[in-house]
Amino acid sequence: MVILLFGPPGSGKGTQACEIVGLTQITAISTGDLLREEMSAGTELGLRAKGIMEAGGLVSDEIVNQMITGRISQPDCRDGFLLDGYPRTVAQARFLDSLLERGGFQTPTVFHLDVPPDVVMGRITARVQCPVCHRIYNTLYQPPKTAGICDFDDGKLFTRGDDTPATVRARLKAYCDVTDPVLDYYRQSGATFHRVDGTQAAELVFEEIAGMLQSAMAIQQ
Ligand code: AP5
């Protein structure tokens, strides 16, 4: 199974990805996390991406397509995977189609987490994340049991450098201008497309997604 998670910054893609992995056991891949790992490691790719990400822009198709090609060729993706934050341009979507076809993967199941901009701003500015397991918390809505510490591995929670109000506004603009058309691309393709009301509590969002996935998994068995 190949799952694609769409939605504006702060719509809950990373939060839902963790839950979907628990349900399906497939590997979750976040291009944002991969880029942040490159930045932390100080690689050439990370240095090229740093300024763009800090300004809220999109990293080039060439860089992210190359990263995804390498990542989905790993053994843990053989039976399927979930992509969080990719594809983000129509060119990336076309590139992914060709990768899936070459790899003999199924047509993707697409979830669009629909959340308006005014809601995401409040969520993002209260977000903290674990550097070890990438689990996501929110100091207002989903706080860890102990402030600043991951519930699962004691990782020291951090705030992302691109979670400032000005950068979030730029990220939202990039989403509206460039990523929205990708949703039309999938609505018109042979992919299974689901819109989910992402303004509900995270548990209810997952219940809705899980219901759809369980039906899809039952059909595939
Ligand atoms: P990326 O890391 O993908 O960021 P994003 O798409 O902006 O999304 P976020 O991670 O901010 O939000 P999310 O939807 O995962 O929400 P979360 O679950 O954390 O990309 C970062 C940058 O990398 C991009 O700007 C770009 O520069 C570059 N990049 C990445 N991929 C690229 C690509 N393909 N092409 C080009 N460039 C690329 O939730 C947010 C907060 O809300 C959390 O605190 C959470 O606890 C809380 N929350 C979640 N759900 C709920 C809920 N239902 N109710 C209340 N609170 C909730």
Image (cartoon, rainbow, N blue to C red):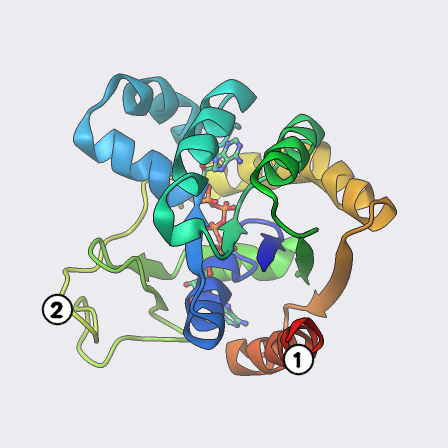
Q: Quadrant of residue 112?
A: bottom right
Res. 200 in view:
no
The amino acid type of the residue labelled 1 equals Ala
Q: Quadrant of the C terminus?
A: bottom right
Picture coordinates of residue 71 (x, y %)?
40, 39
Left or right placement of residue 55 versus residue 189 in this view: left
Q: From the viewer's perspective, tell me whether residue 185 is left or right of residue 60.
A: right
The three-letter amino acid code for the residue at tag 2 is Asp
Q: Is residue 215 above or below residue 192?
A: below
Image: 79 above or below 139: above
Q: How far from the left and from the top, in percent, is residue 39? A: 26, 30
Q: Which residue is mark 2?
A: 154
Q: Which residue is mark 1?
A: 218
Between circles 1 and 2, the one closer to the viewer is 1
- Say which residue appears at 32% left-offset and 46% top-offset: 160
| Cβ–Cβ under 8 Å for marks 1 and 2 | no
Q: Is residue 98 above or below residue 78?
A: above
Q: Between marks 1 and 2, how big is the CA–CA gap?
A: 37 Å
Rendered location of residue 111, percent (x, y)? 67, 60
Instruction: Of the two numbered discs 1 and 2 on the same chain, state the one appearing first in sequence.
Output: 2
Q: Secondary structure at mark 1?
A: helix
Asked whether residue 158 appears in the rendered view, the answer is: yes
Q: Quadrant of the N terminus?
A: bottom right
Q: Dot 2 lies on which element?
A: loop
How many badges with numbers are in the image?
2
Q: Residue at x 82, y 43 (%)?
A: 184
Image-based side of 16 in relation to 40, left or right = right
Q: Percent x, y for residue 214?
A: 63, 79
Residue 159 position (above or below residue 114): above
> Is disc 1 surrounded by few (<14), some (14 to 19) or many (20+) residues within 10 Å?
few
Residue at position x 70%, y 51% in the image: 107
